[in-house]
Image (spheres, helix red, strand yellow):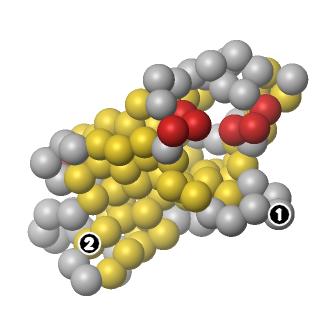
Amino acid sequence: QVQVVESGGDSVQAGGSLRLSCAASGIIFSIKSMGWYRQAPGKQRELVAGITNDGRTNYADSVKGRFTISKDNTKNTVFLQMNSLKPEDTAVYYCKTQYGFRDYWGQGTQVIVSS
C-alpha cells in the first residue's frame, strides 16, 4: 500500500523560509514524478512545483525564484525549499506522487505566513 506523508509546515513571518518534506512508502518500482500543490481557503488547489524521475522541474510563476523542489530517489522523498515567503503563500500544501497508473496524495501540511 502506497502512503504519502508530508511534514515541515509551520507559521512564519513574511520573508522567512520553510522546508517541506514528502516521503512515499510502499514503493517497489520507480516513481514517475512527485509534486507539491497548495490550496488556500476558498481557492482551488494549484500546482506549486513538480519534479520528474529524471530530474526535470517545473514551477508556478508565483513561486519561481523563491521555491526550489528537489528529491532523494533513494528515499522516495521530495523537498520544497521555500524562501522569501509571502502572506499569499499561506495554504495547505499537498504532495502528489505519480506511481504506476495512479496519483497518491498526502494529507497536507499547513503553512501560514504572517505579515
Q: Quadrant of the N terminus?
A: bottom left
User: Given the image, on which type of amino acid does mark 2 rest?
Assistant: Tyr
* Precedes in sequence: disc 2 or disc 1: 1
- Left or right placement of residue 77 versus residue 72 in this view: right
Q: Residue at x 38, y 37 (%)?
A: 69
- Left or right placement of residue 48 versus residue 17 in this view: left
Q: Quadrant of the C terminus?
A: top right
Q: Is residue 30 visible?
A: yes
Please name whichever residue, 29 or 87, is drawn nearer the observer in this view of the structure: 87
Q: Residue at x 23, y 68 (%)?
A: 27
Q: Position of residue 77 (x, y in %)?
A: 33, 48
Q: Residue at x 75, y 62 (%)?
A: 43
Q: Is residue 23 visible?
A: no
Numbered-mark total: 2
> Mark on residue 42?
1
Depicted 15 relative to depicted 98: above or below: above
Q: Residue at x 68, y 65 (%)?
A: 44
- Left or right placement of residue 91 versus residue 33 in this view: right
> Tag 2, which secondary structure?
strand
- Badge 2: how crowded within 10 Å, few (<14), some, or many (20+)? some
Please name whichever residue, 67 or 111, is drawn nearer the observer in this view of the structure: 67
> Tag 1, which secondary structure?
loop
Do callouts 2 and 1 mark residues in contact (Cβ within 8 Å)? no
> Mark on residue 99?
2
Depicted 15 relative to depicted 7: above or below: above
Q: Position of residue 61 (x, y in %)?
A: 51, 39
- Badge 1: how crowded within 10 Å, few (<14), some, or many (20+)? few
User: Given the image, on which type of amino acid does mark 1 rest?
Assistant: Gly
What is the spatial separation of the Cα atoms under label 2 and label 1, in whole angstroms?
29 Å
In terms of image quadrants, where is residue 103? bottom left
Q: Position of residue 42 (x, y in %)?
A: 82, 63
Please name whichever residue, 3 or 53, is drawn nearer the observer in this view of the structure: 53
